[in-house]
Amino acid sequence: MPRESYDQHLRELQDDLLVLSSMVDKAIGRSVTALKERDLELAKQVVADDAKTDSKCLEIEERCVQLIVTQAPVAGDLRLIISTIHLLDELERIGDHAEGIAKIAIMIGDEPPLKPLIDIPRMAEKARDMLRRSLDAFVNRDAKAAMQISAEDDVVDGLYDQVYRELLMFMLEDPKTITRATRLIWVAHNLERCADRVTNICERTVYTVTGRLDKSKTSSY
Amino acid sequence: MRVAAQTTQKLAFGLIWGAGGIAVAVLLLLIGYVVLKGAPAIDFEFLFTPPRGGLGGEGGISSCIVSTLWIVAVTMLLLTPLGLGAAVYMAEYAPENRVVGFIRYSVELLAGVPSIVFGLFGYAVFVTVLSFRFSILSGALTLVCLLLPFLTRTAEEAMRSVPRAQREAALALGATKWQVVTRVVIPAAMPGIITGVILCIGRTVSESAPLFVTMGGSSGMPDGIMSPGRTLAVHVFYLAMETNALEKALATGAVLVVLILVTNLLTNSISKRLQAKMMGAR
Amino acid sequence: MDPKITTRNVDFFYGSVQALRGVTIDIREHYITALIGPSGCGKSTFLRSLNRMNDTIHGARLEGDVLIDGTDIYKNGVDVVELRQRVGMVFQQPNPFPKTIYENVVFGPRVLGETDRTKLDHIAETSLKAAGLWDEVKDELRKSGLALSGGQQQRLCIARALAVEPEVILMDEPCSALDPLSTLRIEELMQVLKRDYTIVIVTHNMQQAARASDWTGFFLMGELIEYGETAEIFSRPVDKRTEDYITGRFG
């Protein structure tokens, strides 16, 4: 079979992307859990683990460079490798967002909660679900699924609006809650950005399959 | 295992050197004997008086030298264009069909026919039927028949060995087929063609039987293309068979050898000059 | 702008074997068009049809239209010699004549009837300059063409082709017998030449096609499978067969 070792390398690249994505996925989950349950140890763990995420990204990028140098990829292969490099960027940023949430959890410490957290965990679940499915779509070259997932960003945006309005009300009624409220708004913002980045991942899936990059659906707040 | 291979190699080398050495030795011996034995009989008189006949082989070989030069000139003048032309046709223009295949086969066959048969053919056709009688013309025409297959084949092979890429290059530049032949193929094949010509000259000088029956045996000085004559090779035959003048025969042989050597040297230098010119214009 | 060369439904036969099927293509002036495809796909056969070099092959037959500047070059009465002056060719193996460098370059003009020594000298200089060889050989024009290196010989052949002032230059894998540096030099040369000529190149080397050409045609088993701008063909080919070939996944 021609180019068997090359195909092997490409497969390994995709597998590594999935590993990276699951690291980031867990980070989101743990950071929000740490926030909800005031688990400072867990939060510190998430912050420390972000370094692992970053170095994994570098490792995968280096492999991409190697493939470009040695295999001179063209057409579909080229688009795949270029998209992989973009995905690394998006996943690393998502990891940073999760780290941000964990840092906020540490900042809040064991202050009394402002309100029970309902929408924020919902946003996290939705973002994580979108992330997982978008990576599947990428690895399976499923452009249709990718476009669908991209559209679900509206759900996360909607939840963010809700959280924002609610916390705004709190701040207007009682100025003493401003610090705590803004911290929570910041957490929600991080999660909303995670979902945005997933839409970028979906755009790259479409690009890999069709060769066309359509940025018109990017919605950024 | 290794040792056996080395020994075989040394043995082979030795045998090859030996064979080469023998060949050179034979050549030197032959030339040496003829020249050394014949040289004493060569003097001014020998070279510049015609033979006078008789059992003692009186006289010299002047008319024979002249006859030989005549026969070479006429033969090559007729042979070269014919041979080249036929070769060009066979190499460049002839289609690959049965007729051409048959022609080629016949030419191959002709090359194996003994020269005396050509002589008889020449006698029958040129001397008798066409009434050229014993003459340089009859002799030349006979030799043309004899040598044409050889020259054609040699020239054709020389032309065929010019790489196809050269012809394509010329065609792609807008040359007509004839221009390709005259400006690329023939110049590139020149060394091979010249070799063929030299060999034909050599054979012309050395043929005796066919010329014996077409040029006659006259020992007089030829004065035209229709004169009969006796070439050096035929004269050697005469001296050896009809007289007991062995030294004179050897002397004639010596002159023959010198003539051939000179011809070869001349044509070689012309060929080199042509090569150099070919690297130059045309 | 009208294409320089147009072919419509060209079928080509070597005797009873069909080498080209229904090839329809427009080749644009002042661009470099690359023809790629696996061995035996017909790209060289197609190239040689453009200057009727296939005429020299016994039993070769072409059906369909091949138009250069709107005129069918296979019509009765077309002067093949004139065609070959307009459409020049550089071959895979450099094939300079066993003559001097000067005589190699002026062979074409001489054959077409030019005898004026001054004009020939001028043509030799211009052509050698255009082929990027002048500086290297200007003091050695009487040297044999065969004494040059492979890359230089190929540039000599290019100079020779340019000397007859063609409009189109066909190149049949011109770099496949050369070292990488000579190859790059000739690719650079092509970029300069395309301003004045139309270049069609057959190549086995995909990187070369991607680097050096503006348009690319992919041939497979005698058919033109896909034809488009080189950047498009190499980043998003439409036909799967094209993709498989250029990514090297040809079974």
Image: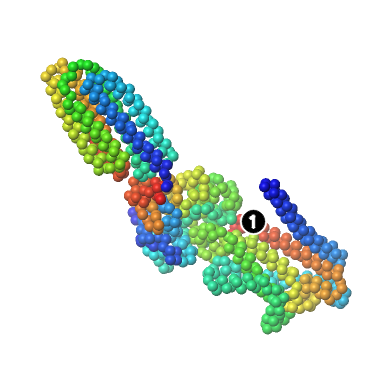
Q: From the image, tell me which residue sits under label 1.
A: B276
Q: Is residue C110 visible?
A: no
Q: Nearer the viewer, residue A28 or C55?
A: A28
Helix, strand, or loop for circle 1? helix
Q: Residue at x 29, y 37 (%)?
A: A135
Q: Using residue B116 as the reference point, say whether residue C14 is left or right of it.
A: left
Q: Residue at x 75, y 71 (%)?
A: B68
- Residue C144, image x, y percentages: 60, 52
Seen in the picture, residue A163 relative to C18 is either above or below; the reply is above
- Residue A33, image x, y percentages: 24, 24
Q: Is residue A76 visible?
A: yes
Q: Residue at x 64, y 63 (%)?
A: B193
Question: Circle 1: is it few (<14), some (14-19), or many (20+) Cα within 10 Å?
Answer: few
Q: In the orientation shown, which residue stands out farthest toward the left?
A: A173
Q: Quadrant of residue C4?
A: bottom left
Q: Nearer the viewer, residue C163 or B111?
A: B111
Kind of residue sitting beneath label 1 = Ala
Q: Quadrant of residue C87?
A: bottom left
Q: Using residue C179 as the reference point, say whether residue B69 is left or right of it.
A: right
Q: Nearer the viewer, residue C167 or B131?
A: B131
